[in-house]
């Protein structure tokens, strides 16, 4: 480490599990998570010279998220999802968790994977990467109010998926 | 001052610690008088805790050793893309969309080659044709007309005055 800036090898050794966990929660499968981590580490290596010592995991979460979003746009796996006014109308995509996590609860991971990207990414950044709304807003280039709304909708969809008979509250 | 209207996203923000002091006090005050909203808050907090309770995920054995042994380089981007395509080809049957894309790509390639070939043939053909000084061609209309008159009817009898016509001996 030089001047508080780690080498990419140190990042891989000390924060690798964090990177991999965020990547896995975003992608829902091991193969894509591994690809995502490797591409993120390439960006880390290129960007370390410009890194300002601070929240390293926040910086890493932002990088892995950007790589994920770039990849999603490039591959266009799913049609772009216009945000519905009523989250109850969202039809979950087929679960991408083809090799659902052995780190149970698998049903929660599958539910997370089935969330539309617009909801899944903020929820993962908030609840897995532990980022503030402000950091998430910066990473996604959307207003903080949008982040708050998407996190709420994402959690509500998850709750509906995991306990459909529970019923949410209409606003 | 009107009473704050609660919403679930406000409760999400509350459990995330994302409300400023004034908003937090107002939400908590409103919550205190509503058991119904307290139940909603409990659901929101429970969902959040469940996601946050997911265990960190371990990468497959040997992954980090491979990553550290092969320092990421610009070439790695290409390698990863190739590896992903190969993996998808071997693991997953291509979706109809993928097939369509590949077919379209092949069609475009064939069309492009055909276009290049046609253009080349045109260029060769143009080069092979001797150029003429005049762009305008004038057929000898007067001469054709005279010859036709000579061979055509010359009298009133439309049949007997027809110009003789050679009869082919073919088949005789």
Image (cartoon, coloured by chain):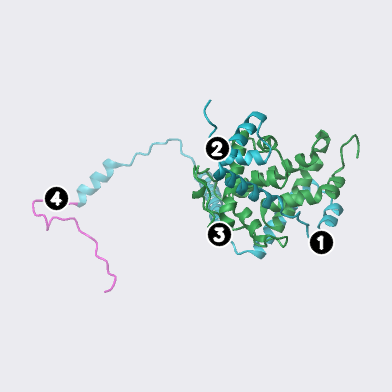
Secondary structure of the magenta portion, mostly? loop
**N-terminal of the two: label 2 or label 4?**
2
In this rendering, would A52 be left or right of A31?
A: right
Local secondary structure at mark 2: loop
Q: Which chain is green?
A: A
User: Which chain, by letter, is cyan?
Assistant: B
Which of the two labelled residues, at mark 4 and mark 3, occupies the earlier sequence position? 3
Which residue is found at the position 52% from the left and 28% from the top?
A: B2
Q: Where does residue A146 sit, x and y in percent of width and height? A: 59, 37
* Residue A115 in picture, x, y percent from top left: 59, 51
Res A142 seen here: no
Q: Quadrant of the C terminus of chain B?
A: bottom left
Q: Along the line of sight, which residue is nearer the eye, B85 or B102?
A: B85
Nearer the observer, disc 1 or disc 3? 1
Is residue B169 a member of the stretch shown in magenta?
yes
Q: Are marks 1 and 4 in contact (CB under 8 Å)?
A: no
Instruction: Indicate which label's residue lies in the foreground, 4 or 3.
Output: 3
Residue B8 in sight in this render: yes
Q: Give the numbered dot on residue B154.
A: 4
Check whether the beta carbons of the residues at disc 2 and disc 4 lie within 8 A of each other: no
Question: Residue A60 at x, y = what percent?
Answer: 76, 42
Q: Which residue is mark 3?
A: B99
Q: Which residue is mark 2?
A: B6
The mark tally for this picture is 4
**Chain-order first, disc 1 or disc 2:** 2
**Which residue is most to the left?**
B156
Q: Nearer the viewer, residue B73 or B14?
A: B14
Q: Secondary structure at mark 3?
A: helix
- Which chain letter matches label 2? B
Q: CA gap, disc 1 to disc 4? A: 106 Å
| Image quarter of residue B11 | top right
Same subunit, tags 1 and 4: yes
């Amino acid at each position: 480490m030089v001047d508080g800036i780690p080498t990419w090898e140190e990042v891989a050794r000390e924060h690798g599990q964090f990177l991999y966990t965020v990547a896995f929660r975003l992608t829902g499968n091991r193969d894509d998570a591994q690809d995502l981590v490797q591409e993120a580490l390439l960006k880390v290596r290129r960007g370390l010279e410009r890194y300002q010592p601070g929240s390293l995991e926040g910086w890493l979460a932002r990088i892995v998220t950007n790589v994920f979003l770039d990849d999603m746009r490039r591959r266009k796996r799913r049609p772009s999802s216009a945000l519905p006014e009523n989250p109850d109308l969202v039809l979950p995509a087929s679960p991408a968790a083809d090799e659902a996590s052995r780190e149970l609860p698998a049903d929660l991971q599958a539910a997370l994977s089935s969330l539309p990207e617009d909801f899944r990414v903020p929820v993962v950044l908030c609840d897995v990467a532990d980022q503030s709304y402000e950091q998430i807003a910066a990473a996604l280039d959307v207003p903080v109010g949008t982040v708050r709304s998407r996190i709420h909708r994402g959690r509500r969809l998850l709750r509906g998926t995991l306990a459909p008979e529970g019923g949410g509250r209409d606003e | 001052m009107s009473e704050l209207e609660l919403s679930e996203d406000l409760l999400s923000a509350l459990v995330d610690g994302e409300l400023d002091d004034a908003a937090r006090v107002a939400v908590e005050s409103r919550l205190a008088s509503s058991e119904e909203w307290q139940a909603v808050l409990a659901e929101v907090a429970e969902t959040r805790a469940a996601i946050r309770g997911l265990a960190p995920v371990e990468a497959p054995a040997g992954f980090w050793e491979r990553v550290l042994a092969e320092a990421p380089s610009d070439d790695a981007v290409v390698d990863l893309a190739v590896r992903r395509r190969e993996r998808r080809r071997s693991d997953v049957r291509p979706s109809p969309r993928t097939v369509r894309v590949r077919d379209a790509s092949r069609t475009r390639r064939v069309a492009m080659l055909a276009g290049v070939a046609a253009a080349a043939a045109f260029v060769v053909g143009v080069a092979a044709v001797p150029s003429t000084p005049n762009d305008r061609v004038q057929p000898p209309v007067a001469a054709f007309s005279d010859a036709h008159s000579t061979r055509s009817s010359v009298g009133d009898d439309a049949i007997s005055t027809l110009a003789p016509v050679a009869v082919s001996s073919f088949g005789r």
